[in-house]
Every structure is written in structure tokens, then in C-alpha cells.
Image (cartoon, rainbow, N blue to C red):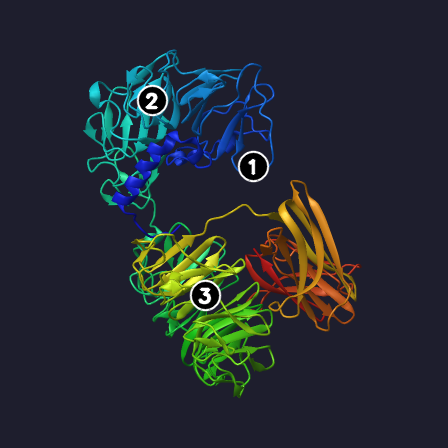
């Protein structure tokens, strides 16, 4: 999904109305919720583990995504439409179980369950689009062949005088009722009189508060009076909500409290005031609920970073989402906020680079102050306050910062500068939390991109030498020395990202490592390879996700197919972000950041997917059921010369094998063993493999490559293990969401946990078995765990 836009009323309105007309086609709707399905809580909230309804549950519930059947005793049972495996549907003798079409809405009243949708029979009884289950048998709402509404039911709500039904219909029973009606237990009635009863178009949401019924949908009149997409019925008459009534587009969801009505839908205003997709009616006036990502920035977005649930945005703006924010801001999923209070928030010049770390973010660019404090071109925001990198006048660097990358306890800084912390540092340097360090002789021209993996840092830019030796636009620093990556590129590299299968590079090149590669390529630790036929113009930003990479830049083609300024490489093929001709954005994408299925983009654009989005937006990828649900994966020492890899799965679908891979640097992995998988199973399985031929090195990295029967694959999280003076030191679980255990230490060893600034935030002591238990409660981020001669990275999620 892309936040930060408003859809075309004409196009989307026609589409939604067309879908409603197609409700009579059960196959098309068997797996999809109705447009108004968000009007009530999911029915899953009132289900017992066996799918029966919990005793005492009452109210209106959304049944989208569930299939209705009967249990062995005839009771209604709901199961998710995506549930795997076969289930018998045993209804009472002589009665068909369930209904014969899709269900869109449920309402519970006492011991009865009301079911609405697009069907003609319930339990073998003729029941037109709505039916009742009383705990033992199905019944129609009405006695004639014209029982129930004559069109699909999208919403149900229980009131004090009966059940309210909403949808797309002209009659309920034998009574003319436009799109909404009431069933009192014996008869149907319209809401209002004459031909103007009810509402003028489809109803997708209902909510009851006392004697007041709130109705939302696609209509613009209620009871013959203008009412834009939402209205209320007090038992005798209709009323709009406010003088500049209702919303400016469709309403899909309603929720009522004793004093307020909350409304959700496709709208951008409520009561004539800005309210993006959600609003509140307090009985007298409308209110927006904060600001949305769609409001965007008033200047170019140059960089993005994600830390936990927070998205950081940097660039050339001074306002975002209507909030004053100087060149950098954060989005918490609900609202925008500046980094720091008052007019001196943020920085005093453009922010060109961001890197998440610990509970905050490192910021680089063209500034000399942060939050009113002197900070030369680079600084840190810890979530509550700003700090420069060093406390003396020589803090930071002496020139423009264009790139940042974090590793355990350190941040690497690249750009166009000659010194860091007052010492010589040619265009790239390291801050270890206490002091600045040069990376050898550095590089001979500006650095535009940095990426880190384990102890290795990759740099890209306009340079032609690194560490005094030739390196064409891209190179790596291993902690001691610089080395080129093959023969490099034929033009500058301006973006880098580390993925599961290597390092991705983007820029202005058309050749990489002597191989034709149009503007983007991959380094696997040994050689460069193109990503298909690449793009037709420069790549300016990269973000890895799963087995692929998102690519942004100045292009309009990827793999020879239309892809406007942003695209995805899934490991084998290119995909546009959006299926229409208006896929992607309408101008350059300078920055990308990925988290789960969400990818955030920043740049020069004003639309994304053909919809308004001011310079920043997000895209949500479609998801599919995971072929394997991994419960655990750990690497532990069996002896000084043997490592045991153990993992467990909860379920598997068409799984062929697990390939165990090892790496000395966290980037270049090699296969060390294969274990056959269970195939397709709904029960838990445990697996293990011993690595008894260990390479020389102080630190090892392991991961699983799960391969399906069709050849597709996915990777597990990476696990690390340190080798120290006769001991194999391991840290697990890693990543962790709570406590962690460090084993393989000498008894009595003091263990320290250090944050990104090098400060000790937790300690523990190894017991007689050499095991230290690290406490829970650390803030999300990356830490260094030191014990004896060993140091391991710990990720806290």
C-alpha cells in the first residue's frame, strides 16, 4: 500500500460499484472480503479454538476471510478461508450444513447468530442473503419465497429492536427498502417512508449506539436528504452528520462509543476539513485523527532509515505532514514529529544520509548544528536528544557527509572531507563511540555510498584508488586494509546494499567487473553479475528485502519492461511496483528503506501509483503463505572443534530440503551440509547438523537455505559464533526479543553488553559451566557482547 495519496474518485468508484454487481458470482468472492468488511471487529475475536462461537459473545462482527460450516452437533463453525487440510462438515441429519455462497457479515444476539452475504440457501432452507442460526437449526428471516433482501448483505448490526441489515438491495422481504432495513424477529421494515426511504446507494458499514444507528457506504442521500457517505437513523428520521455533512468519499468502516463515532474509508476530508481516511464525529462536529504520511514533505527527500517501528526521513525540507521539521523528521506509523523541540529542532542544513542504530539514528549532511548544538556534518539522535560525535571543537568531519553505515559499536562515515575529529581521514572514517579513526589512507575522491556486513565495509563513489591502490569506484575495507572488488565499475557507484546473496551496487555504470551490467549489479564475494538486463538509466538507491532488492533512480524501464523510477529484482526477474501504467512514481527516487513487506521511497516525485504523494510514500508488497514456519534456529558449541546447528519448524508445505551455509564474514556463504525436509506437514519437526570441519577464524556465521520442491528458496536469519583461545563462544537466541545466553566462556568470565556508543548497558558473569545469562529489557538495536577475548554482535528486536 502506498501512503500519502488520494485516489481517483471516478475510476475507483466505478471499480467498487462493478465489484458489488459481481457479488452474485460466488467463485469470484469465495476468497475475498467485501468492501465494507472492515466495519466491525473480526469474528475471529469471538471464536473458540475449534471454530465455534464463544458463549456470551454479542455484537456485530466481520466474517471476511472465514468460511461457515456446521460442527458435529450442528453448531456453526467458522474456519479461515486459507486454512490448510481437509475438514468434514457434519451437519444435523437431513440438513445441509452452512450456506451456499460467500458470507460478508455476522452479528450475534443471545444464542442466535445472524449471517449475511450473497447466498440463496442456509442449511438447505431457502434464505435470501441473510439467515439465522439458533444453535440447532437454520431459518430464513421471513416466511415467503421473498424472505430477506433481494441483493447482497454487506453489514449487520444488532439493536434494541432487532437486527439491522445493510447492503445493495431494493427490497427486504416483501417491503421496499433501499439498501438498509430492520428485522424485528417477525417482520421486515424500511428505515423511512415512501420511495426515499433508506439511502441512495450501497451500505458497507453499520454501528449501533443506544437507539441511534450509524450507516456508512457509497450513498449521497439518506431519507431524501443530502448525506455524504455517512448518516444516522434515530428510529424515526434520518440526519446527516454536520452542516458541511459527511465525507468526500466512500465510507467502509464505523465504530461507535457512547460519545463518539469513528469513521474509516477512502476520504480525504470530513465535514469540509482535512481528514485522511479516518475521522471522528463527536455528535456535533468532525475531527481529524492526526496527520497522515500522505501529507509528505515540502522539499526533496534524500534519505530514509528504519529503526523498529519508526521511519526517519532526511532531505531538503523544513516541513513534513504539516509539522515544522528542519531537514529531518520521523514517522511513527501515526503521525510526523521533528527530532527535538522548538524552532532549533533538527539540523541547520540539508540531511543527505541516515543510518539507524540502537534506539535512534545517525545523521549526516551539510550542516554545522543539530538541535542548537554545534555538530560538524554528522551527529546522533538517541531518540530523545542530539549529540555530536566527540565533544571538542574538532567534532565530526570537515566536509560534506554523503553516506553512513553502522556495525557493532561503530558508525562509518563517507563523503567529501579531509579530516575527522581533527585527524587526517580521506573521504571515509570510523567513529567507534569514543574516538575517530581513519581507514588507512582512505580513498582519493568522494564516497557516495557505504554498506557494512560483519567486519567488512563496502564503499562506492567517484574514486579510482583506495588505500593507495587502484579501485574503480567501489572497494572494501576489512578492518585492516583496502581491496578492490574485481575490476570495479566503468562509472561512479552511488548506492550499495548488503543482501542474503551478496552486495548490490547501483550507479551510473554500464560495465561492472568487466561484465555488461546496466546501472545495477551484484557481488557474490568472488565475482560481479548483472541483474537481468538492468535498467535504462542510473540507479540512485537500493534496499534489500528477502531474496531480492528494491531499486530506485532515474529509470523508466527495468528488465526491458515499464517500471517508473522504482522496481524490484526478486532474484530471477524484475517487477514493477504496481500493475498499471501509473506504476511507481512520476519522478526520481533518491532513497529507499525496507521493513518486512513495506518499502518506503523518498525523492522528487509528487505521485506514487498514480496517486498524490508528496516526495515520500510507502509500498506494501503482496504476501503469500510461508512454505515453512521456522520456530527456532541456533548455532552452539559442542566442543572446541565442532558446532551444532539445530532448528525446528511448526509447519511445512512442499519443502524439499534445508541447506546449511557458513561464512567467515557474514557476506560470502558456502554450503556445508544438506538435511532432507518433511515435505508437507502440519506437525512440528526438529532438525540438526554437526559442523565438524571448522575453518581458521575467530568468528563464524551460519544460515539456512530452505528449498521448496519447485526450486524456490528462502533464507533464515543469520546466526554467529566466535572462536576464542580453545573455546567456541556462542550467543543465542540472536536476534532476540528478550534475554540471551552466552556459552563457551571460561568460568567466572565477566561479560559486558555495550551499546552503539561503546557504553556498558548490562553485565553478567559466567557460571561454572561457562554460561552467562544476559538480562532482558534492552532497547531494540545492535549491541556488542564482550567476554574474555571474544566479542559478538547481539541484535535486539
Q: Estimate the x, y position of residue 445 in percent, counting from the top left.
A: 44, 83
Q: Is residue 428 above or below residue 578?
A: below
Q: Is residue 208 above or below residue 367?
A: above
Q: Estimate the x, y position of residue 512 in percent, counting from the top left.
A: 49, 76
Q: Which residue appears farthest toward the bottom when viewing the image?
A: 468
How far apart are the two marked residues, 3 and 2, measured between alpha carbons? 53 Å
Which quadrant of the figure has residue 320? Answer: bottom left
Q: Residue at x 53, y 25 (%)?
A: 69
Residue toward you, 63 or 674: 674
- The residue identified by callout 1 is 83
**Label for residue 451?**
none
**Label for residue 542?**
3
- Pointer 1 or 2: first along the chain: 1
Mark toward the viewer: 1 or 3: 1
- Pointer 3 or 2: first along the chain: 2
Q: Is residue 255 visible?
A: no
How far apart are the two marked residues, 1 and 2, measured between alpha carbons? 31 Å
- The residue identified by callout 2 is 150
Q: Residue at x 33, y 44 (%)?
A: 277
Is mark 1 in CB contact (under 8 Å) with mark 2? no
Q: Is residue 555 above or below residue 738?
A: below
Secondary structure under tag 2 reads loop
Residue toward you, 441 or 597: 597
Amino acid at each position: 500500500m502506498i501512503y500519502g495519496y488520494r485516489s481517483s474518485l471516478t475510476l475507483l468508484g466505478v471499480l467498487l460499484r462493478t465489484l458489488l454487481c459481481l457479488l452474485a458470482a460466488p467463485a469470484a468472492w469465495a476468497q475475498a472480503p467485501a468492501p465494507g468488511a472492515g466495519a466491525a471487529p473480526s469474528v475471529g475475536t469471538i471464536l473458540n479454538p475449534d471454530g465455534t462461537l464463544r458463549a456470551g459473545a454479542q455484537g456485530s462482527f466481520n466474517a471476511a476471510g472465514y468460511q461457515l460450516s456446521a460442527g458435529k452437533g450442528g453448531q456453526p463453525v467458522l474456519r479461515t478461508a486459507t486454512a490448510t487440510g481437509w475438514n468434514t462438515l457434519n451437519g444435523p441429519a437431513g440438513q445441509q450444513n452452512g450456506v451456499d455462497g460467500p458470507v460478508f457479515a455476522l452479528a450475534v444476539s443471545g444464542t442466535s447468530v445472524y449471517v449475511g452475504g450473497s447466498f440463496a440457501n442456509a442449511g438447505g432452507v431457502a434464505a435470501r442473503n441473510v439467515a439465522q442460526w439458533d444453535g440447532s437449526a437454520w431459518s430464513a428471516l421471513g416466511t415467503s419465497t421473498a424472505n430477506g433482501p433481494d441483493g447482497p448483505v454487506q453489514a449487520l448490526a444488532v439493536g434494541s429492536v432487532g437486527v439491522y441489515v445493510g447492503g445493495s438491495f431494493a427490497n427486504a422481504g416483501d417491503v421496499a427498502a433501499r439498501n438498509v432495513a430492520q428485522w424485528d424477529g417477525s417482520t421486515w421494515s424500511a428505515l423511512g417512508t415512501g420511495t426515499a426511504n433508506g439511502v441512495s446507494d450501497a451500505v458497507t458499514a453499520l454501528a449501533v449506539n443506544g437507539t441511534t444507528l450509524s450507516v456508512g457506504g457509497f450513498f449521497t442521500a439518506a431519507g431524501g436528504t443530502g448525506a455524504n457517505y455517512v448518516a444516522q437513523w434515530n428510529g424515526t428520521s434520518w440526519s446527516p452528520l454536520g452542516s458541511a455533512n459527511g465525507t468526500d468519499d466512500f465510507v467502509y468502516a464505523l465504530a461507535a462509543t457512547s460519545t463518539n463515532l469513528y469513521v474509516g474509508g477512502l476520504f480525504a476530508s470530513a465535514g469540509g476539513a482535512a481528514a485522511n481516511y479516518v475521522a471522528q464525529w463527536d455528535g456535533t462536529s468532525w475531527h481529524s485523527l492526526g496527520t497522515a504520511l500522505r501529507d509528505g514533505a515540502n522539499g526533496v527527500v534524500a534519505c530514509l532509515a528504519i529503526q523498529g517501528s519508526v521511519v526517519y526521513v532526511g532531505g531538503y525540507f523544513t516541513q513534513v505532514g504539516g509539522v515544522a521539521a528542519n531537514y529531518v523528521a520521523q514517522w511513527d506509523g501515526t503521525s510526523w514529529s521533528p527530532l527535538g523541540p522548538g524552532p532549533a529542532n533538527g539540523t541547520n542544513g540539508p540531511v543527505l544520509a541516515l543510518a539507524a542504530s540502537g534506539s535512534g539514528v545517525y545523521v549526516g549532511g551539510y550542516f554545522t548544528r543539530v538541535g542548537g548544538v554545534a555538530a560538524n556534518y554528522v551527529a546522533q539522535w538517541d531518540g530523545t536528544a542530539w549529540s555530536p560525535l566527540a565533544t571538542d571543537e574538532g567534532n565530526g568531519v570537515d566536509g560534506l557527509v554523503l553516506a553512513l553505515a553502522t556495525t557493532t559499536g561503530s558508525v562509518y562515515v563517507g563523503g567529501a572531507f579531509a579530516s575527522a575529529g581533527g585527524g587526517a581521514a580521506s573521504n571515509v572514517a570510523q567513529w567507534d563511540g569514543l574516538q575517530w579513526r581513519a581507514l588507512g589512507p582512505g580513498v582519493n575522491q568522494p564516497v557516495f555510498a557505504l554498506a557494512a556486513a560483519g567486519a567488512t565495509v563496502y564503499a562506492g563513489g567517484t574514486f579510482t584508488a583506495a588505500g593507495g591502490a587502484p579501485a574503480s569506484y567501489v572497494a572494501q575495507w576489512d578492518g585492516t586494509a583496502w581491496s578492490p572488488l574485481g575490476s570495479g565499475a566503468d562509472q561512479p557507484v552511488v548506492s550499495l546494499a548488503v543482501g542474503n546473496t551478496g552486495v548490490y551496487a547501483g550507479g551510473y555504470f554500464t560495465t561492472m567487473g568487466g561484465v555488461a551490467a546496466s546501472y545495477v549489479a551484484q557481488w557474490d564475494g568472488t565475482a560481479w553479475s548483472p541483474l537481468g538486463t538492468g535498467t535504462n538509466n542510473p540507479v540512485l538507491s537500493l534496499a534489500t528485502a528477502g531474496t531480492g532488492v528494491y531499486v530506485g533512480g532515474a529509470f523508466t524501464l527495468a528488465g526491458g519492461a515499464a517500471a517508473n523510477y522504482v522496481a524490484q529484482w526478486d532474484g530471477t526477474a524484475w517487477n514493477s511496483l504496481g500493475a498499471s501504467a501509473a506504476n511507481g512514481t512520476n519522478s526520481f527516487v533518491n532513497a529507499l528503506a525496507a521493513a518486512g513487506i513495506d518499502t518506503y521511497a523518498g525523492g522528487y516525485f509528487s505521485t506514487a501509483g498514480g496517486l498524490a504523494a508528496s516526495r515520500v510514500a510507502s509500498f506494501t508488497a503482496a504476501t503469500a503463505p510461508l512454505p515453512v514456519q521456522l520456530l527456532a534456529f541456533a548455532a552452539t558449541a559442542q566442543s572446541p572443534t565442532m558446532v551444532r546447528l539445530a532448528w525446528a519448524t511448526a509447519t511445512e508445505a512442499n519443502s524439499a530440503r534445508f541447506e546449511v551455509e557458513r561464512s567467515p564474514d557474514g557476506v560470502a556463504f558456502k554450503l556445508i551440509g544438506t538435511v532432507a525436509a518433511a515435505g508437507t506437514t502440519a506437525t512440528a519437526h526438529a532438525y540438526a547438523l554437526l559442523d565438524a570441519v571448522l575453518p581458521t577464524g575467530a568468528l563464524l556465521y551460519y544460515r539456512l537455505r530452505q528449498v521448496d520442491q519447485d526450486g524456490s528458496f528462502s533464507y533464515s536469519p543469520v546466526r554467529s559464533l566466535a572462536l576464542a583461545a580453545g573455546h567456541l563462544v556462542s550467543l543465542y537466541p540472536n536476534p532476540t526479543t528478550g534475554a540471551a545466553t552466552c556459552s563457551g566462556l571460561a568460568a567466572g568470565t565477566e561479560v559486558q553488553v555495550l551499546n552503539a556508543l561503546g557504553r556498558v548497558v548490562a553485565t553478567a558473569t559466567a557460571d561454572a559451566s561457562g554460561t552467562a545469562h544476559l538480562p532482558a529489557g534492552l532497547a531494540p538495536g545492535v549491541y556488542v557482547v564482550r567476554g574474555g577475548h571474544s566479542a559478538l554482535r547481539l541484535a535486539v528486536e
